[in-house]
Amino acid sequence: MVGTDALQAIIYARGALRLLDQRKLPLEVDYIDVKDSADGWNAIRDMVVRGAPAIAIAAALALAVEVSGLDFTGTPAEAASYVSKKLEYLVSSRPTAVNLSDAATKLQTLVSKTAENVKDAKAIFQVYIEAAETMLIDDVADNKAIGSHGSEFLQRQLGNSKNISVLTHCNTGSLATAGYGTALGVIRALHSGGVLEKAFCTETRPFNQGSRLTAFELVHEKIPSTLIADSAAAALMKQGRVQAVIVGADRIAANGDTANKIGTYNLAISAKHHGVQFYVAAPVTSIDLALQSGEEIVIEERSPKELLNSEGGLGKQVAASGISVWNPAFDVTPANLITAIITEKGVITKTDSDGAFDIKGFIQSAK
């Protein structure tokens, strides 16, 4: 589906799901079997799988595997209730990523409506499985569209330059999605179009998604790339070595405020100061129109061990015993620091001199 040599975070066939254990990358490539929603919850919470789009798909498919072989004797309404409760449970694994809750809500609505028109509980599970499988297929197509829109827009914004260098943060590629990627998908498209000079990626502490995962993908795809320390980004921009920053999103509020991996806000402030364009690349499922601003976004806090120990908490202790830790997984970048938001439906640009986005209007016109 994404090429035989492409990296795949999710390997699925009906009744079977395997997730690439991204905690072990780049030194070891190991897949774990996911047999039910409990396995899926643990894989998401423990960051075996991560990245907002991949989390949503992994959760949906984990439940699909569970119900594919389920010996269920209840009514269609009871089957729909079973699916709905399992989805609520899966959403609790990572609350900040809106893709997961959005997917769960859509799937809950689907099974609820189906229960009104069928007599066999198995039909509920069949409809659910097919919908979850469609999510997997659609994500790759959406990501390629994001890459295409983003590449074309950046080239226009940068005067059709043939030597574009960009900086990205965290991991937004094949490992964070069903395939191809969002922000990294834009970088892939720039590279395939022959206009990418270099992609810079941050380490992305404390879990090191940049050094472990993004660097791994860039090397695998033979994209010219350089790893930098998180704290080197401002110096890189001051030297004029990047023309744009491209990041993903876990949740985008109606006004364009964007929650993404901790450190994104730092990059946006530095980009604004140095006159570097700052882009968010994400599917429309990452947009939460129910939230008026980023102030309403719930920010997950991770284990203190991720800071106290090496290897994102998996290695030996490196910090002083007794020190307290604040470890938010995400921060919120205000919309006024964002140049544009790249989606599979097109690019959302500012609508007035105040620098505001009309995201609701864009989504309505794109339908």
Image: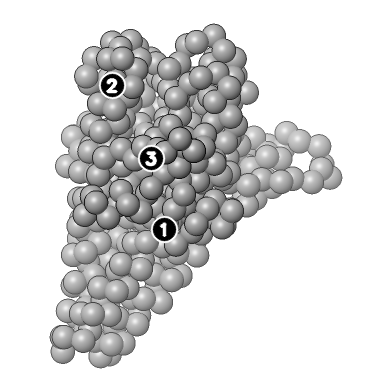
CA gap, disc 2 to disc 3? 18 Å
Q: How many marks?
A: 3
Q: Nearer the viewer, residue 98 or 271?
A: 271
Q: Which residue is mark 3?
A: 351
Residue 17 coordinates in the image, percent (x, y): 29, 56
Dividing the picture into quarters, in which one does residue 296 lie? bottom right
* First-in-chain label (2 vs 3): 2
**305 left or right of 272?**
right
Quadrant containing the C terminus is: bottom left
Question: Relative to 168, does residue 290 appear above or below in the rendering?
Answer: below
Tell whether label 3 touches label 2 (CB within 8 Å). Answer: no
Q: Amino acid at mark 2?
A: Arg
Q: Which residue is mark 2?
A: 156
Residue 240 coordinates in the image, percent (x, y): 50, 10
Residue 100 coordinates in the image, percent (x, y): 40, 58
Which residue shows up at 74% across the image and 45% down it? 325
Q: Which residue is mark 1?
A: 289
Tell whether label 3 touches label 1 (CB within 8 Å). Answer: no
* First-in-chain label (1 vs 3): 1
Picture disc at residue 269: none
| Crowd band around label 2 with a 10 angstrom C-alpha radius: few (<14), some (14–19), many (20+) | few
